[in-house]
């Protein structure tokens, strides 16, 4: 029997927090509670929740900052966060969504509506563990399945592709432009792999701005060269048209670069998947 999903409720109003906790326990969820932002961050560090209900107005730190810190950590970057708030302004909602919240509920709320939104967010998160939510490429769990098979095979090739300064790009141009740039990279990788990667080329995404292509050692170097040429040609179009190169809030100009590396079975043997990935990442070099 599957373990019940774990919800963290971060709410400083005791009556509201206790009501939410009692309700979601009655619905079969495991529930943790925190009244302070720092307490919430410590609880998440100890036990990873499946979903977080996060009030924006907290005594020690606002919910936006809590969300920002969680999104900066690999462990919690994809944990669904639903904001609970009395703020109703459109810009407040956009700020929360831009930080990566999956939903935004204003108080007072309908508890049945909240229950359905929690259920739907958990279902989406369950699906998105298999694919990246931005590019729809196979994500880490599916990639590891492929790499496990790869370690037992002969004649394989592997390309590791990274995009630098994605966060700075997002700070300057917004999350929509950032996601568009990542989708463009994913599309180029898929198209070039289909053209030049052999019949069984596989494209996946190992992180927000990290991609991997599994092919064979006869195609890996040609594929690397063609990708380098195509990405170098297209990278200027990632920046919004008719707009000067903006600066991040810290005053730095974002500068996206593509780093690309290729390895094959000849670079081994590899003891495990981590050793293979470390070798592939260390082989990457900037191409632009």
Image (spheres, helix red, strand yellow):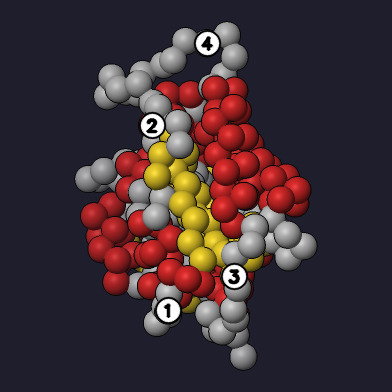
N-terminal label among 1 and 3: 3
Can you give x and y, in whole percent of width and height, for residue 234 in the image? 60, 28
User: Cα distance, mark 4 to mark 2?
Assistant: 16 Å
SS at badge 4: loop
Q: Nearer the viewer, mark 3 or mark 2?
A: 3
Image check: 280 left or right of 47?
A: right
User: Cα distance, mark 1 to mark 3?
Assistant: 12 Å
SS at badge 1: loop
User: Cα distance, mark 2 to mark 1?
Assistant: 37 Å
**Do tag 2 and tag 1 residues touch (Cβ < 8 Å)?**
no
Residue bearing the label numbered 3: 156
Can you give x and y, in whole percent of width and height, for residue 25 in the image? 51, 75
Q: Is residue 135 visible?
A: no
Q: Is residue 158 visible?
A: yes
Can you give x and y, in whole percent of width and height, for residue 161 in the image? 50, 49
Q: Identify the residue at image location x=51%, y=66%.
A: 264
Image check: 164 left or right of 38?
A: right
Residue bearing the label numbered 2: 168
Quarter of the rendering containing residue 8: bottom left
Residue bearing the label numbered 4: 243
Can you give x and y, in whole percent of width and height, for residue 188 in the image? 66, 41
Q: Identify the residue at image location x=28%, y=52%.
A: 37
N-terminal label among 4 and 2: 2
How crowded pointer 1 is (Cα within 10 Å; few <14, some 14-19, many 20+) is rated as: few
SS at badge 2: helix
Image quadrant in which the N terminus is located: bottom right
Image check: 100 left or right of 132?
A: left
């Amino acid at each position: 029997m599957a373990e019940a999903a774990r919800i963290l409720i971060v709410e400083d109003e005791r009556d509201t927090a206790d009501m939410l906790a009692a309700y979601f326990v009655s619905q079969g969820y495991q529930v943790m509670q925190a009244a302070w932002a720092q307490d919430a961050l410590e609880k998440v560090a100890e036990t990873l929740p499946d979903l977080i209900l996060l009030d924006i107005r907290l005594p020690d730190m606002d919910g936006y900052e809590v969300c920002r810190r969680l999104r900066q950590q690999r462990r919690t970057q994809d944990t669904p966060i639903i904001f609970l708030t009395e703020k109703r302004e459109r810009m407040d909602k956009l700020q929360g969504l831009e930080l990566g919240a999956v939903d935004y509920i204003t108080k007072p709320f309908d508890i049945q509506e909240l229950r359905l939104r929690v259920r739907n967010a958990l279902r989406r998160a369950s699906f998105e563990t298999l694919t990246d939510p931005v590019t729809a490429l196979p994500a880490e769990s599916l990639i590891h399945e492929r790499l496990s098979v790869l370690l037992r095979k002969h004649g394989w090739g592997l390309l590791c592709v990274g995009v630098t300064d994605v966060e700075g790009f997002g700070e300057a141009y917004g999350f929509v432009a950032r996601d568009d740039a990542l989708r463009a990279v994913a599309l180029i990788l898929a198209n070039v792999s289909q053209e030049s990667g052999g019949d069984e080329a596989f494209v996946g995404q190992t992180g927000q701005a990290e991609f991997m292509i599994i092919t064979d050692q006869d195609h890996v170097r040609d594929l690397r060269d063609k990708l380098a040429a195509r990405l170098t040609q297209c990278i200027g179009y990632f920046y919004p048209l008719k707009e000067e190169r903006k600066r991040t809030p810290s005053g730095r100009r974002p500068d996206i670069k593509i780093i690309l590396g290729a390895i094959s079975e000849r670079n081994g043997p590899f003891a495990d998947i981590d050793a293979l990935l470390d070798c592939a990442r260390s082989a990457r070099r900037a191409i632009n």
